[in-house]
Image (cartoon, coloured by chain):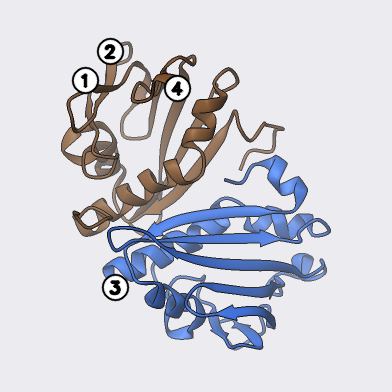
Chain colours: A brown, B blue
Amino acid sequence: MSTTTINETTVQVYQVFIKATPERIWEAITKPEFTRQYFYGASVDSTVEVGSPWRYTGPDGSLWGDEIVLEADPPHKLVVGWRSLYDPDLADEPASRITWEIQPQDGGFAHLTLVHDQLEQSPKTAASVSGMGWMMVLSGLKTLLETGKPLADES
Amino acid sequence: MTTPAAIETGTQVYQVFIKATPEQIWDAITKPEFTTRYFHGAYVENTRDLHVVRGPEGQDWGTGPTFDFDPPRRLVHEWRSLYDADLAAEDASRVTWEIEPQDGGVCKLTVVHDRLEASPKTAASVSGEGWMHVLSGVKTLLETGEPLFAER
C-alpha cells in the first residue's frame, strides 16, 4: 500500500491474487473474448499501442468507453483513460485514469493491482466505481482465468 | 477499499465475490481443514465462544473470543497477531466476516478489520495485500478445489 496521504474518493486501489501467468492476465484485460465474460458484458477494442483508442462496447452495441492508451508495457503495466459513457451523468464528468499492474509472484500466480485515479473532478464517477464495482470486475476476471467460466451463472 | 486515510481511522474493509453458497463460505472460514489451505497455513477453528488460531507447530497465533456467531451470515472475533512479537505487543483488534448472497450463484464476502486505532503496526501488517492474499485464497479454494498458493 502507498504511504502517501491520498483521498479515498480520488485514488482508489484494488488488488487480487490470481493463479495465472502475467501473459494470461494481460490477455484477459486486453481481448474482447475475455472482457465480455467478466466486465458487465463489455467488449474491449484496442490495438493496445500508446496513443491508440481504448474502447468498450456494451452488449447492446452502444459505446461505454472511448479513451486512449496512455502507457503499455505488456504483460506488466497498462494505463488507459476512463470515462463512463454508459451513464449520461457520469459521461459529463472529466476523464479519469486506470492503471493495471501485474506482478508475477513465486509459485505460479500473480498479483493484479488496479488503481483508479485522477478522479478529483469526477465525484459521481468515483462513487459509481468504488467498492463493489471494481471488485466485481476483478473477482470475475480471477474466476474466468482459474476456472474457464464466468463468475455468475447465466440468467 | 483501504487507503491510508482508512488505516488512520482504524477500519479496513475488503470484499470479494465468490461462486459458492453461503454455507460453503462459512465452512471455509470457520473450519481448519479449509483454513490450513489458504490462511498462511493457520489452523483456525471457530465456535460460538472461541476463535482458535494455531500455527503449523501448534503454537498460539491469536486465539481469542468470538463476539458474534450467526451461520452462515456473520462472524465476529477478536484479532491478535501473536505470530509476531512486535504485533503481539499491540492491543487486540476485531475482525467481522459478512456473507451476502447475490444473483447467479455468487456471494459477496466482506472482511472488516477494525478497532485498530491503537495498533498501527498490526494495521499496516494486514492492510492491502495481507487481507487480499487471504480472500484471494478462499475464493480459489472454493471455486477450484485447489489452493492458490503452495501448501506448507
Q: Which amino acid does label 1 sit on?
A: Thr
User: Is the Cβ of the residue at disc 4 closer than 8 Å to that at disc 1?
Assistant: no
Q: Which chain carries label 1?
A: A
> Which residue is denoted by mark 3 in the rendering?
B145
User: Is the Cβ of the residue at disc 3 closer than 8 Å to that at disc 4?
Assistant: no
Front residue of A132 and A15: A132
> Which residue is denoted by mark 1 in the rendering?
A47
Disc 4 from disc 2: Cα separation: 23 Å
Which tag, 4 or 2, sits closer to the chain's start? 2
Give the vertical position of B90 relative to B128 (above or below).
Answer: below
Disc 2 from disc 1: Cα separation: 7 Å
Which tag, 4 or 1, sits closer to the chain's start? 1
In front: mark 4 or mark 2?
4
Helix, strand or loop at disc 4?
A: helix
Q: Which amino acid does label 2 sit on?
A: Ser
> Which residue is denoted by mark 2 in the rendering?
A52
Helix, strand or loop at disc 2?
A: loop
Q: Which chain carries label 2?
A: A
Disc 4 from disc 1: Cα separation: 26 Å
